Image (cartoon, rainbow, N blue to C red):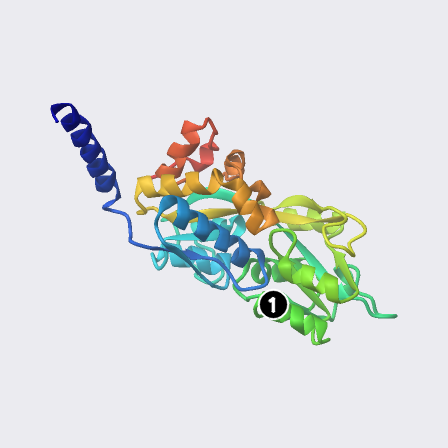
Amino acid sequence: MKKLALPILALLAAGGTAFAQHTSWPKSLTLTTASPGGTFAVYGQGVAAVVSDVVKVPTSTMQTQGPNQNVVLIQQRRAEIGMTTMGPAYEAWEGTLVINKGVKHTDIRALFPMYETPFHVVAIQKAGADVQSMKDLAGKTVGFGPAAGTPGVYMTRWFKDLGINVTARFGQGNDMASQLADGRLDAFAFGAGLPIPAFSELDTTHKVNFFGYTDDEIKAIMAKAPYVAPFTIKAGTYKQQTVDNKTLSMWNFGIAHKTLPDDLAYAITKAVLENNQRMVQTHAAAVDTLAKNASTNRFLPFHPGAARYYKEIGVAIDPGAQPQP
């Protein structure tokens, strides 16, 4: 009996220590995503499932208008974790976010890299009236997804910067696709991880054209938007896409409020990044959900818990994204 006493006490002590580390954790987590039809909604289900199963904290998703609204919800602590694109994150940090201007969202922290969001357009083929370029959309009616979503904010802005006047329509991604199929829209301009579910659906049901930006359009947009980068959507991404589409992209990151417990932020980051194959099974865009891509964040401070994980595995964080109090 005496020989068993120490192992039993050690086990109890270990269990007590583990429990003590988790007393500050919430009993459940909410993850902000976006509207159906885009990648966030699907990808977010994968994140929620991994965190629930691996971290052992039940995690549910909240459909939102997308990245812009998500940074506001995290800043206001109306959700524990969220997903955002770095354009909205940059403007939120600077206090110029279109839906909450004048407020600096400096309590948001980066957790893990997700994937790049390329922006492109799909249009139904029409005899004698094919839409095959951004300039072809002049005077047309174009759907952009939710008004506060990344395409709704940035692609509409870029059309104005390029001097291309369009009539903008907003709504959930699936609704935009339906309106395009019904002829109520001339095109659907969107940005999400590839392949975009709503675009893939149209690709299987209609004859469509896919296109991005010209070299000159990309150069003009990049001159005003330092958080975007050139991107090529490879031919074959969709069945009817026969040529490469040149366009622009932004990275997406998982985020949290700075008050999320450090050990929980560490556990979430580790769980998502070390279960990549499972994430890819949820959505192909997760192929880029890799720790090495943490370096693509050059301005948003990482949560100390996430930073600890990157340090452990030898991934360097950009000097501009070092943890802050």
Q: Secondary structure at mark 1?
A: helix
- Determine which residue is flagged by label 1: 174
List x then y, in percent, for residue 101. Answer: 44, 60
Residue at (23%, 46%) from the top-left corner? 23
Q: Is residue 268 positioned above or below 39 on the image?
A: above
Q: Nearer the viewer, residue 282 or 11?
A: 11
Quick one: 205 or 199, which is closer to the camera?
Answer: 205
Q: Which one is in front, 173 or 187?
A: 173
Residue placed furthest toward the front? 1
Q: Residues within 10 Å of mark 1 (few under 14, many from 20)?
A: some
Q: Is residue 299 visible?
A: no
Q: Percent from the top left, x then y, of residue 72? A: 41, 58
- Residue type of the residue flagged with mark 1: Asn
- Judged left or right of residue 79, residue 64 is right
- Could you say where residue 99 lies in the image, as x and y percent from the top left? 47, 63
**From this viewpoint, which residue is outermost toward the left?**
2
| Residue at 55% in and 41% down | 277
At horizontal 48% and vertical 39% (from top left) the residue drawn is 273
Give above or below for 151 relative to 323. below
Residue 244 lies, in percent from the top left, at 77, 47
Where's the N terminus, which quadrant? Answer: top left
